Amino acid sequence: MPSMLDAVVVGAGPNGLTAAVELARRGFAVAVYEASDTIGGGAKTEELTLPGFRHDPCSAVHPLAIGSPAFNRMPLARHGLEWLHPQLPLAHPFPDGTAAVLSRSVGETAMSLGPADAGAYRRLLAPFAGRWDTLAADFLRTPWDGLPRDPYRLARFGVAALQPVSWLSRRFRDERARGLLAGLAAHAIAPTSGFATSGIALCFALAAHDVGWPVPRGGSQAISDALASYLREQGGVIHTGTEVKRLDELPPARAYIFDTSPTALARIADLGQAYRHYRYGAAAFKIDYALSGPVPWTAKEARAAGTVHIGPTAGEINAALTAATTGRDPEVPFLITAQPSVIDPTRAPAGKHVLWVYGHVPAGWEGDATDVIERQLERFAPGFRDLVLARAIAGPPQLARRNANYVGGDIACGAYAGLQTLIRPKLARVPYATAHPAVFLCSSATPPGPGVHGMSGHHAAKAVWRRLRASP
């Protein structure tokens, strides 16, 4: 390793690894420092319950990863990343045993919403379906980085995307369509009346139709491992088990890039109150299950889906999210569940299964939501509790200890609310730069925000290499 590195990256999550790769493949000398003993950040896989049951502690299903412009420019398949697609990306069951579905087919999805809304769904998606590559490059970009590829279509997308999903839902007559859209928007961890929640719903729907909602074979760790392998191939170095508390603990470098929360960056780099107005959002309450068999969903569509949303109605979903964001205990939670072992037999012993589930709770909440979550699961999968062999429970304090970026249990590393929806971590021409000319931020607190897509790391790396090329 040269005496003076070009860049040091702090944090080996998907954004940190992507930033390191982008610089290393351009010939810069790069080293990554990770506090944990293993790499991955929000993309890890561990035996949290019993031997042979491989769980994803954080993210599990990856439409934004398979559709990432950054990842798609890298030979990650050569480094072991294999995508597995379930028969259905998503099922949204109802108490009567039926389900709306998000299918790879726009038509199949539309028909699951019922005759009253099938046409409205087709019309909503028609301008965008089949154009993921161009649209993703535009809405996963950062405004400072040149003009969009398709300004007209991006503007048309933006007209719908900037609305609260509660407004967008007015196009539909039936609760099936409204519930499906509300569940998609709920990934923002914000009430359905929130600004730009329609954008989240449309993004996930479009991804399902164009690229799918797959899982990586072996678990989310495969994404991080592929990035790390490619980084090492390009000459990058990764140090694990190294917690960084001060900037001067790091080796000399021309640039430092932090895949951390803004709060941690300010503390480590001595930036004072630079991010004092940055807001963190509601938290997750996560349970990983080892099961003796597949989840006994009443709706047959849910048995074939990689992801199952448990709402079911837009009203219930909004009530659950509003409770979490206003500091109230969960009563009837909205659940996002994933069942990767339906498509990936490597995740559990033969005949056994894993289930990944989380609901929403107030930031820093110290209660136990296990019972209300399992009551909700039993509502749509009677007999579920009888299949539980073991469970690994992580409320907000445990999530924050597991991943320092999840401040107060906020898995998005920042609230999706108000101006912060579009301007994060603060108003700046280059949001990845800081008051320190050699220090940059690349976590999901920067545009385009949460998700395992590496685009925050990609854009931050671009800001860094422009600076490095301009300086002697």
Image: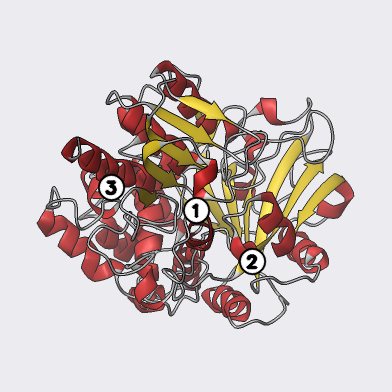
- Pointer 2 with pointer 1, Cβ within 8 A: no
Amino acid at the residue labelled 1: Val
Q: How is the image coloured?
A: secondary structure
Q: Is residue 100 above or below residue 250?
A: below
Residue highlighted by disc 1:
101
Left or right, 257 with respect to 98, comes to: left
Q: Earlier in the sequence, mark 2 or mark 1?
A: 1
Residue 125, numbered label? none
The alpha-carbon separation of the residues under discs 2 and 1 comes to 33 Å
Q: Nearer the viewer, mark 1 or mark 3?
A: 3
Amino acid at the residue labelled 2: Gly
Return the x and y of residue 141 as percentages of the image width and height.
26, 51
Residue visible at 30% across and 38% down in the picture: 69
Residue highlighted by disc 3:
136
Judge the density around disc 3: few (<14), some (14-19), many (≥20) Cα neighbours within 10 Å: some
Q: Which quadrant is home to the N terminus?
A: top left
The answer to whether residue 105 is seen in the rendering is no
Q: Is residue 110 above or below residue 24?
A: below
